[in-house]
Image (cartoon, rainbow, N blue to C red):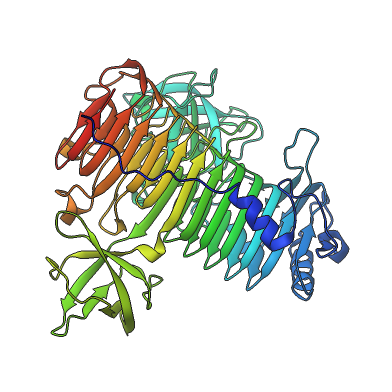
Amino acid sequence: MPKKSSVRFLKFPLSLSVLLAAAAFGIGCAGQAQPASVTVLSVDDYGAVPNDGADDSAAIAAALKASSEVAGPVRLVFSEGTYNFRPASTPAEMVRIEDRRDLIVSGQVAEDGAPATRLEINLELVNDTLGAGHFVIENSENIMVENLVLDYNPRFASAGKVVAVDREQDTVEVDIFPGMPHFDGMRCYSANSWDLETGDLLQVEALTIGLDRKRMANTWHPVEGAGGVRYRIEGIGFSDRVAVGDGISWHFTVNGSERNFLILYSENITLRNIDIFNTLGAAMLAGYNKDIVMEDVRVIPEGNSLAVGPRDAFHLSNNRGRLLMDGVQVKGVRWDPIVSRGTFNEIVEIEDDGAIIVEVPWPRMTFESGNTLLFQVGEVPYERVVASAESLGDKRYRIRLSDPALPEVSVGDFVANTSYEFDDVVIRNCTVEGNYGTGIVFMTQNALIENNLFRNNAYSDIGLGPTSQDAGPFARHVIIRGNTFDGSNWVRKHSGASGHDGSITVFSNQKKLMDVPYNQDILIEDNVFKNLDHREGLAAVNVKNASDVVLRGNSYENVSQHLKVGEHTVDVTDED
């Protein structure tokens, strides 16, 4: 008799964004009704002028300051058009929201529903810039950002059509597309190739990959007598993977740059109807927050751009509460479009009275009374509640537990602070396609992933479990339902038993925890898998390091293998 899954049915009552908006501002889902209790301010009244090309940052800062002096909720409004930011130095941000509550930042909406207000950052075109971001939101509560285009002009990426290839000399020449930036000596980070007729990412290994600047020493140079738009690169090693007529995209920076959104230590954050057309690094880094909503947020190429950014789209680290992503689109990023992760913390000492000394990998991770810790030991990890926590400095904490009995725990074992994990995650109605990474990387708990389209991503569409020594812990209580998975995972990430061989792959890449089934309680049902026959060993679902996994009601078209079960896995029920 098939084993009954213990996966919880997860859902938000109504839409979380509706509840947050109603609680914070008294507005409806469309965000347009304006009760008397909300004060409306316009950035134009403080000197910002759209479409004049002048720097608007001082006026925006003045409007933000004025809004902070208003008692009660405030809507800060931008007119239709383009507002500019030309920072005198970097790093910098265009809009800083710090120590605020009950604030809506609103652009205008075009007739087709697209945002009609553009926040544009204008930077000197150089390699490896620290740059400037659009929004920093820190130590704030009940913040909504809506109806905006976030872009750079010039963009810190380029694209062109391959017009010549010499494999013996390892040279490639491209004609830069109209409107795309270019300069002598531009670096070629996170380069990929594209089918210019379909706009699809070509299924070849990345042209360039990695963060090492020394490996990217070979740069683009203009070809003399070619009108200033033909460029050549030689010796970088991808001439064997491109052909005349291909499109190529590349980026001028990859590491250490500002994000379009940096969100830290905040609560009830809603982003709605946002277009992001270019990123310097990741589009968003959000850490140590509670309750995040993203509705109709699009990280997609625009115009002659083929790609958007050289890093993740949304990197969500050590957050809690609820996450809703509805109608999100991601195309053209290198690395992973959506990441939700917690942290492995190492036990470095166990004292005689049962207190444990824990070392954290990053100083922002803290512990306090009432936190719940998950000990990664034994047949099934178990929880304990923190009675008290004392910082010892140097990223170490002395932690006393309400129940000091710790079966099987030893120095060198790992513990996760589940108080820094989302309680509920819903990712629905999203499109994730044409990215050189894993569509969703999920390392925590309580997720419903439904009614999404995943297509033509280089690695797995969904990866469940820890990706590295510090990033974790494990995926638990996950429902993957009603999605379409089409033609991804044409690059096998990792080798041997650790290889990612499924459109959905369950894995463990924490070096000390590679032989345990700690990814738990996973239901995969009513999905469509197709066009997954393009490499040896590929399956629709690849399960390892897992327990209590159920497949049922899924359909398969042009799929060479629907289920591949790897090592350290127990209790897999295959009803397909």
Q: Nearer the viewer, residue 523 or 9?
A: 9
Residue 296: x %, y % from top left: 62, 41
Which residue reaches farthest front? 1
Q: Is residue 348 left or right of residue 295?
A: left
Q: Is residue 476 visible?
A: yes
Q: Which of 232 and 102 is in front in this view?
A: 102
Q: Is residue 158 left or right of residue 342?
A: right
Q: In this view, does 354 lie to the left or right of 304?
A: left
Is the residue 485 above or below the residue 101 in the image? above
Q: Which of 55 and 422 is in front in this view?
A: 422
Is the residue 206 above or below the residue 337 in the image? above
Q: Which residue is found at the position 17% from the left and 60% from the top?
A: 377
Residue 272: x %, y % from top left: 65, 47
Q: Which residue is found at the position 51% from the left and 28% from the top?
A: 174
Is the residue 424 above or below the residue 98 in the image? above
Residue 534: x %, y % from top left: 31, 19
Q: Can residue 124 be seen in this view?
A: no
Residue 546: x %, y % from top left: 22, 43
Quarter of the image with the N terminus is top left
Quarter of the image with the C terminus is top left
Which residue reaches farthest top? 558
Query: Count of labels shown?
Result: 0
In which quarter of the view is residue 42 placed? bottom right
Q: Is residue 554 left or right of residue 154?
A: left
